[in-house]
Image (tube, rainbow, N blue to C red):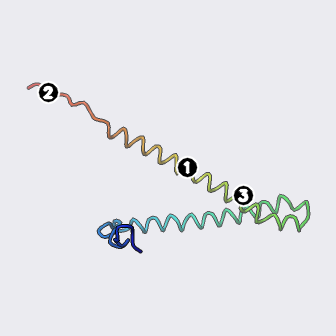
Amino acid sequence: MTHSRGTSSASLFQGQQLRYGASEVIHKKVRSMVIVYALVALAGGLVSCVLLWSYGATIALLSMPFGGSLFVLIAAVLVYMRASGEADSSNERAVYKDQPQKLQTTES
């Protein structure tokens, strides 16, 4: 793949490597979130089945994918809100640390 200036994308990223382990951390987070979302989907399907069982087995079983998807959507929104809240608080701490400190001179 070449860009408009004729350089390849491989040469653009030469010398820009992730620190050892940074990509592994990302993959572990992604794998754990996939497992969490799958478990939430199963739990949501079972909850919707139990709640709608009084309407008949057919309705309850057909509602399981919708209930699971709804629970995953709710879980994803909660995870997003938590992650954005943590990012905001860490940004505030970083700004606070970057503020210049007044140096006091001591007389000898």
**Looking at numbered disc 2 in the image, what kind of residue is underneath it?**
Thr
Identify which residue is drawn at 36% across, 38% down. 96
Quadrant of the rendered image containing residue 103: top left
- Callout 1: SS: helix
Quadrant of the rendered image containing residue 4: bottom left
In the rendered image, residue 89, in percent from the top left (x then y), is placed at: 46, 43
Position of residue 89 relative to residue 67, above or below, is above
Who is closer to the viewer here, 39 or 59?
A: 59
Residue annotated with mark 2: 106
Closer to the N terminus: mark 1 or mark 2?
Answer: 1
Badge nearest the viewer, 1 or 2: 1
Near mark 3 (Cα within 10 A), the count class, few <14, some 14-19 or many ≥20, is some
Q: How many angstroms separate mark 3 from mark 1 (CA)?
A: 18 Å
Q: How many angstroms separate mark 1 from mark 2 (CA)?
A: 45 Å
Residue annotated with mark 3: 70
Q: Are marks 1 and 2 in contact (CB under 8 Å)?
A: no
- Callout 2: SS: loop
Q: Quadrant of the C terminus?
A: top left
Position of residue 95 relative to residue 80, above or below, is above
Q: How many angstroms separate mark 2 from mark 3 (CA)?
A: 64 Å
Identify which residue is drawn at 91% across, 60% down. 55
Near mark 1 (Cα within 10 A), the count class, few <14, some 14-19 or many ≥20, is few
Residue annotated with mark 1: 82
In the rendered image, residue 40, in percent from the top left (x then y), is placed at: 67, 62
Closer to the N terminus: mark 3 or mark 1?
Answer: 3
**Looking at numbered disc 1 in the image, what kind of residue is underneath it?**
Arg
